[in-house]
Image (cartoon, helix red, strand yellow):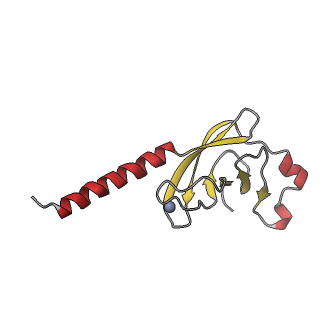
Amino acid sequence: MGLFDWYRVDATERCPWCEGEIDLLQGKPDGRFLRVWAQGHRAPVDHLVEDESRLSPDGLAAQRHPSGPMEVSGTCHAGHWIRLLAVFDDDGTWVEVDSSEERRHADEKRERDRIAEWRRRNPL
Ligand SMILES: [Zn+2]
């Protein structure tokens, strides 16, 4: 039994490290678990549990995510660990993904790698 929900970002959201596809991410919004929230939707789109404990379609439709930014994390298809903010409006609709912090980390790493490569090619 996982103590988290799943988060599915739009396919247009890409891994800040490699621009690859992002897998289902995980986050911990409240006491209900293993629902699948999808970017752009107001209610969970799925519930990944055994049949007997799965929420009914009406039960799923009645679920609302807490508003505000929610930290979600996981990996891209290539295995890069990523952490993003899923932003929910007052109505509970997932309206935005903020990946600026992770992009900054990826950019800094690329810059460090560039400098290390330059130093390797230009020994003192
Ligand atoms: Zn990646």
**Quadrant of the image for the C terminus?**
bottom left
**Quadrant of the rendered image containing residue 122:** bottom left
- In the rendered image, residue 31, in percent from the top left (x then y), is placed at 71, 47
Q: Of residues 59 and 37, which is closer to you in this image?
A: 37
- Image coords of residue 23 (percent x, y): 61, 62
Q: Residue at x 74, y 55 (%)?
A: 35
Q: Is residue 10 left or right of residue 20?
A: right
User: What is the count of numbered marks?
Assistant: 0
Q: Nearer the viewer, residue 13 or 31?
A: 13
Image-quadrant location for residue 118:
bottom left
Left or right: 99, with 44 as reference point:
left
Q: Nearer the viewer, residue 114 or 9?
A: 114
Q: Position of residue 17 (x, y in %)?
A: 46, 57
Left or right position of 112 against 66: left
In the rendered structure, the answer to whether residue 46 lies left or right of residue 7 reads right
Determine the image quadrant of residue 98.
top right
Q: Is residue 120 above or below residue 16?
A: below
Name of the residue lying farthest toward the left: 124
User: What's the residue at 76%, 35% (across, down)?
Assistant: 91
Picture coordinates of residue 36, whole percent (x, y): 73, 55
Answer above or below: position of 76 versus 66. Answer: below
Residue drawn at the location 69% of the way across and 62% of the way down: 1
Residue under the point 56% across and 55% down: 14
